[in-house]
Amino acid sequence: MAKAPVTIVRGPQDLEVTEGDTATLECELSQALADVTWEKDGRPLTPSPRLRLQALGTRRLLQLRRCGPLDAGTYSCAVGTARAGPVRLVVRGGYRALLGQERNLSVLSELRSVRAREGDGATFECIVSEAETAGIWELGGRPLRPGGHVRIRQEGKKHILVLSELRPEDAGEVRFQAGPAQSVAQLEVEALPLQMCRRPPREKTVLVGRRAVLEVTVSRSGGHVCWLREGVELCPGDKYELRSHGPTHSLVIHDVQPEDQGTYSCQAGQDSAHTRLLVEGS
C-alpha cells in the first residue's frame, strides 16, 4: 500500500515582535518523519547562531533570536509539494531600527575569486559590519543549501562558504547577500585531462555477419571521444554506430565482413587505445 504524502496540517501565522526579542514560527505536519524547508522572501534559510530549526514530533519550529529590522519579511515552509505561507514577520521599533540598521549594513571584506582544479575544494569568506546577520549564498544564480559538497557557517561578522569535490560545471559567479550588502566573486574550475578508465580489448574476434562492439569508459561524462580505423576517423552511418551514455562510449560495427578486419583506435584527450579486429568465417 502506497504511503500517504506528507501534508501541512497547520501552517505558521503572522507574527509581530519587538526588536531584540525571539520570534518563533511553527507548522505542524501529518507525519513526524519529514524534512521541512523554511524560506524568507522566497529564499531558503539555513541554521546559524541566531536561527534555530527544531523538530518536535510532528511540529516544526523556526526560532530567530535577537530579531532586528533585517529579519522582517515574509516566511513560508514547505515539505515535498506541500507549502504553507507566506506569513509576515514584523519587527517593531527600537533605537537600532530608527537609525536604519539595514541602510548601515555594509561589506567590510569582499569575497575573493578562486581558481581550483577538478576534485579540489574552494573557500569563500565575506565579513559584514553587523554580527550574527542572516545571509544568503548563491552559485550561478542558484541558492546554496548546506549538505553534500556544500558547507555554510558563520563566525560573528564573518560568513564562510566551503565547496568540496569541485566539478567543471560548478564554475560560475559566487554571491553573498545580507540585506542590502552583497559581494560577488568568480569560481573557476580547471578540468582534469580526460583519461580512459576502462579500455577496449587489444584483440577482438567476430564472426562474419555479426556485429562487433568496442567500448571504452573515460574519467568524466561529456568528454569528447573519437573512433578511428587505420588512422581515419569514423563517422556514424549504416556501417558504424557511435553511442555514448555518461562516461561510457561505444563503437558498433554492423554486419561485419572480412574487409572490416583491421586496427581500430579510440582517442580521448591525450589518451588512446587500439584494438585489432579479426573476422572469422566465410
Image: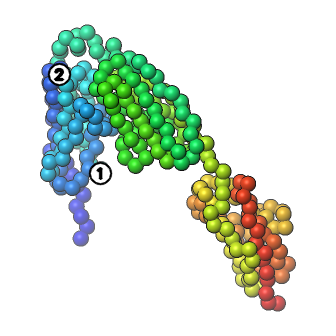
Q: Secondary structure at mark 2?
A: loop
Q: State left or right for residue 107 relative to residue 69.
A: right
The residue closer to the viewer here, 227 or 204, is 204
Q: Which numbered circle lies on residue 20?
A: 2
- Please determine whether, in this image, residue 127 is positioned above or below residue 201: above
Please provide percent x and percent y for residue 204. 73, 79
Q: Residue at x 61, y 42 (%)?
A: 190
Asked if the residues shown at circle 1 and circle 2 are in contact, with their CB atoms under 8 angstroms apart, the answer is no
In the image, what residue occupies the spot 29% across and 51% down?
80
| Residue displayed at 45% across by 41% down | 163
Hey, what amino acid is under mark 1? Gly
The color scheme shown is: rainbow
Q: Is residue 116 above or below residue 280?
A: above
- The residue under label 1 is 80
In this picture, is 77 found above or below 209? above
- Residue 156 vs residue 138: left or right? left
The quarter of the displayed image where residue 86 is located: top left
Q: Quadrant of residue 205?
A: bottom right
Question: Toward the viewer: 228 or 218?
Answer: 218
Q: Quadrant of the C terminus?
A: bottom right
Q: Amino acid at mark 2?
A: Gly
Among the two numbered marks 1 and 2 on one chain, the one whose residue lies closer to the N terminus: 2
